[in-house]
Amino acid sequence: MENTSERPTKFLLIMLAALTAFAPFVTDMYLPALPSMTESFNATTSQVQLGLTTSMLGLAIGQLIIGPLSDKYGRKIPLIATLVLFAISSALCIFSSSITMFVALRLIQGLGASGGVVLARSIATDLCSGKALASVMAIIGAISGIAPVISPLLGGWVLTFSTWHMVFAILLGIGIVLLGASFRLPESYPVEKRQPLSILQSFGQIRELIKNRIFMTITIMQAAAMFAFFGQISASPFIFQTHYGFTELQYSAFFGTNALAIGIFAFLSTKFKTPQNSLFTGTIMLLISAICVSTALYLNTSPWLFECCLFTMMGSFGLILAPSTAIAMNAARKQAGLASAVLGAAGFLSGGIASPIVGLGNIQITTGIVFIASALLTFLITCTYKKIDCGSAQNSFQQIQLESN
């Protein structure tokens, strides 16, 4: 199937959104249970947060493996294989008897979930190009914004009558549903387009990506932004529940509201004239809101003022992630699988580092430092991208549009 400026079918669009939303369910659904899990496993805060770290590490490593393999063998078979792995590891998580066993299984679970994340971007790139790709990425981002809304709310509701074990039973059910639906998914990367390389050669093509200045700059920028994104995911249960005293279900409502901000602003990113304009606006918004959130934490303000600042900060990610992903994938569409893998892995590796850091010392101060450092670095790298090749990226979009027409 050749690149086109048309959108995928409704089934494909829903499936791509569901696969993209897979990672938020894996990382977010059990967040309300983190404080109670410290008691269940008789573990420290940082030890329990390692479950987030290993799952993100699995998501990162898995993407680096699945991406190149999908460039060689197509998208469908790797997707089915990873969903099977996810289902098995989710079932085993339910019976974890120690924090060590749980953390190890979360690594495997992340590996299994990685296929859906990396292949959703690859399939979208196979089917769409230019502005159509930016539009699809934004729509997927808006739809997948529902997942972080639903997952912690569902997790918080489950915890009102059950334990964290039931959360992973539901994750197992979601994995099985996606596995069944994946058999209906058409292969988007035909044999004639696949690269006639050995597996080692496929992995070796990462050197070409490193030379792609636009792709690498955007990848590093996203990794910097994701440092704050995942730092918030890891710290928020303890800030809302332990510091402010909200219940698990109330925390889920706060988290869902903030996740909804991402979806709303991802949709608004399609209203900008170019993806670059959305990216630059989002970067400035992230820096200002990160300073406000950090100040609110440091001054121990009311939870409502803190929440207003945090809502704005989370909304900035909607303006940043969808357009920057489209820019990066357009810049490296000849290696869509590998490019998607590197782009996603960089973000999850960054998140894996941020998750335990926010749990060190006073979580309010540490979290504020993480937010400001991440936002400032994101802003500086975006300025570098603008100086290096901002116009070049837009020309690439226009050229692809002309070719597709």
Image (cartoon, grey):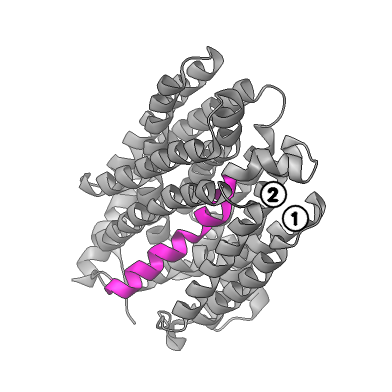
- Main secondary structure found in the magenta portion: helix
Q: Position of residue 15 (x, y in %)?
A: 39, 70
Residue 391 drawn above or below residue 120:
above
Location of residue 365 (image quadrant) = top right
From the viewer's perspective, tell me whether residue 270 is left or right of residue 185: left
From the viewer's perspective, tell me whether residue 362 is left or right of residue 263: right
Residue nearest the viewer, comparing 201 with 319 = 319
Task: Tell me the magenta residue range.
Answer: 8-31
Q: Position of residue 371 (x, y in %)?
A: 53, 29
Disc 2: which residue: 51
Residue 22 sits inside the magenta stretch: yes
Please identify the residue farthest to the front as the structure is shown.
161
Q: How many numbered dots are placed on residues in this image?
A: 2
Q: Amino acid at mark 1?
A: Phe
Q: From the image, which quarter does the N terminus lie in?
A: bottom left
Q: Is residue 228 visible?
A: yes
Q: Position of residue 146 (x, y in %)?
A: 38, 52
Location of residue 345 (image quadrant) = bottom right
Residue 253 drawn above or below residue 346:
above
Disc 1: which residue: 102
- Mark 1 touches mark 2? (CB < 8 Å): yes
Identify which residue is drawn at 41% across, 20% down: 305
Q: Position of residue 127 (x, y in %)?
A: 33, 73
Please identify the residue farthest to the top as the structure is shown.
299
**For numbered disc 2, what is the local secondary structure?**
helix
Q: Amino acid at mark 2?
A: Gly
